[in-house]
Amino acid sequence: MKEVKQFETTIGGKKVEVTLGKYAFQSNGSCIVKCNDTVVMVNTTMSKAPRPGQDFFPLGVDFEEKMYAVGKIPGGFKRREGRPSDQAILTSRLIDRPLRPLFPKGLFNDVSVVATALSVDPDVAPEPIAMFASSLALTISDIPFAGPTGSVDVAYIDGKYIINPTEAEREQSEIDLTVAGTKEAILMVEAGAKEVSEEVMLKGIMFAHEEVKKQVAFQEKIAKELGVKKCENIEYYQVPEEIEKEVRAYAYNQVVEVMSHFDRYERQDAEDKMDEDVLAHFAEIFPEKEREILDTLYKLKKEVMRAKILNDGVRPDGRKTTEIRPIWCEAGVLPRVHGSGVFTRGETQALTTCTLGPLSDMQILDGLDEEDGIKKRYMHHYNMPPYSTGEAKQLKSPGRREIGHGALAERSLLPVLPTEEEFPYAIRTVSEILSSNGSTSQASVCGSTLALMDAGVPIKAPVAGVAMGLIKDTESNKVAILTDIQGLEDFLGDMDFKVAGTEHGITAIQMDIKIKGIDESILRTALEQARVGRLFILNKMLEVISEPRKELSPYAPKIITFNINPDKIKDVIGSGGKVINKIIEETGVKIDIEDDGRVCVAGVDAKMNQRAKEIILGIAEDVEVGKIYSATVEKIMKFGAFVSFAYNKDGMIHISKLSTKHVEKVEDVVNIGDKVEVEVIKIDDKGRIDLKLIAVEQK
């Protein structure tokens, strides 16, 4: 066992304890980080050499949710953890994004980072602790890594920013912000917000960065005390200088010509021809070096594109830096769905549908939470089939990217949705990406807004999103911030900064940096440029549908809610569900009853909804002396007739109460199956009900 080392620091006013060398000592780097009762373990490992033919950096990051961390046994048949939950996948992405840019170029060895939540305190979220611990594990390992990084969550309550808020503080906060970075700059931002201003968001990011710097200093101190040495016998991939020099000299002018085509398809055709020509030219000069030749061409294309933007202000498709591609929209394109919308920006196109359901259709999430399950009323799902990029591939289940994009769109729209009391529906939007060339996640935000309004969901304000890009030359410090980036600008640029919101403020942000961070001035400019772009896009959307439709689709369920005495729930349900199932069979509706007596009735036919409500209220009401009810004769005896009324109540009409005159036989007045009106005259101490006949329905 290695020598055990322990360290302490403070993050957001809470003591954080770090233990090294005690557990998992076969990892390249391992640590246990504890804050209150939240304990996270991170282990990181690296393969000794790249796999044969490896041509990219295979970084794997996984966040493991263990149900024992909150004293729960997993559900399901196997009673063990299965595939990662969406939340675990999103956390894995949060850990990955600030780490990835800090590994050296040409490192193709497999690197694995596994963060495991061993114990979770509801007031200390494991996610920021896992992000911090992942950086620490890499920093103290021999794996080459240009960190460390720090990571924090930020809340904003009553004008005050709070680092790593408690569960109660998160619920009150106007922003849900996660920031990661180095001591020099910010690397990653993820945020949801309740229509806050750009200034509030920017100050929150910079407030977080101050805490990030402290975390970085703490990790550097640990690494220094441990005397960490990074592995030096790694073979980094790089193009031999001779090949790069020769290819540059031969192909430079061709690359300039290729990148002068503004039309994407013309440029692609020219690029393919150039690649073929260059490979053929060097086939005998540099045999079996196709990869190195193509990598040099890629590098050249990147340099030329970036230079045109920085020096001439001209983008690959001819746009100016602040110009947005042509936009067109549609609403109500699918007749049978509850709501639909199409948002098209350049070659990016999203079709979104909206489906409304009763509250029982809410998703129940089982995760690291003390409750039995979190109910999720709004669900947004994102799909990007291969045909959206012109590829002929098999369809696959949603991956990390699809889950991440869906979560971003969902977060963008949550702040504008009506409350459950205002609109008692479960809501699901699904974005199908029909064509992709940059910023499909923000297209899905716009398409979802159109679909929600088409469905008649009374959203508080429409939401639009735009993706910002960055080209930064480190030598000259020239910077260009791009509005509405397309695919090529994303691949060859330095930043993907997505901002969604209403005309009043920001509802969500997601920022990823490919360089070693950005500063406040770039952030400020990007946020303002995004605000202008967002308002432009919103105006285009509102030309198609300016407000939510006043009526729901005829195919959407109509929902009514009301309350009954909780003590009467058992009467409405009946033994083995007999009563409620009979109501459902008779009316064709769906009925949900909460423990507090709240009843939700959902059905396409509003008349049947009302009928179900009347029946339920009739069952739940207490029978009152003197009140008149409609009843059905169920049984005849010599001394009177037994009737049922108010759906599940029984009473007796004595023969003497069938008429004001003398009655010889009960059958002289009523028979089984007769519909009658009765008045309650007495309820005894055993709950037995005596009635008198008011009238018999004429057949």
Image: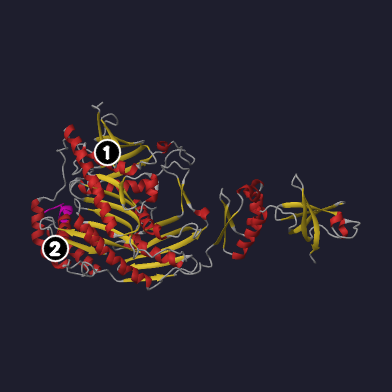
Q: Residue at x 87, y 56 (%)?
A: 666
Q: Quadrant of the C terminus?
A: bottom right
Give the residue type at disc 2: Ala
Vertical placement of residue 366 versus 562, above or below? above
Q: Is residue 110 above or below residue 280?
A: above
Residue nearest the observer in this picture, 287 or 56: 56
**Label disc, if present, on residue 341 of the rendered structure:** none
**Which is closer to the viewer, label 2 or label 1?**
1
Q: Please state the horizontal and vertical placement of residue 5, each as a whole percent of the image.
A: 24, 29
| Residue 315 placement (x, y as % from top left) | 20, 67
Q: Is residue 118 left or right of residue 533?
A: right
Image disc number at residue 307 = 2
Q: Which residues are magenta?
A: 285-293
The image quadrant of residue 440 is: bottom left
Q: Is residue 272 above or below residue 402?
A: below
How would you rate the neighbour count of disc 1 (Cα within 10 Å): few for under 14, some for 14-19, many for 20 or more?
some
Q: Which residue is mark 1?
A: 10
Q: Secondary structure at mark 1?
A: strand
For the residue marked with disc 1, what is the amino acid? Thr
Q: CA distance from mark 2 to mark 1?
A: 45 Å
Give percent across and percent down for residue 445: 36, 62
Mark 2 or mark 1: whose residue is earlier in sequence: 1
Does residue 443 lie above or below 543 as drawn?
above
User: Which residue ends up furthest to the bottom in the rendered image?
Assistant: 543
Q: Nearer the viewer, residue 566 or 665?
A: 566
Q: Is residue 351 among the parts visible in the rendering?
A: no
User: Dot 2 surroundings within 10 Å: few (below 14), some, or many (20 or more)?
Assistant: some
Q: Is residue 40 left or right of residue 365?
A: left
**Is disc 2 placed on a helix, strand or loop?**
helix
Name the foreground residue: 611 vs 277. Answer: 611
Magenta segment: does it hold 657? no
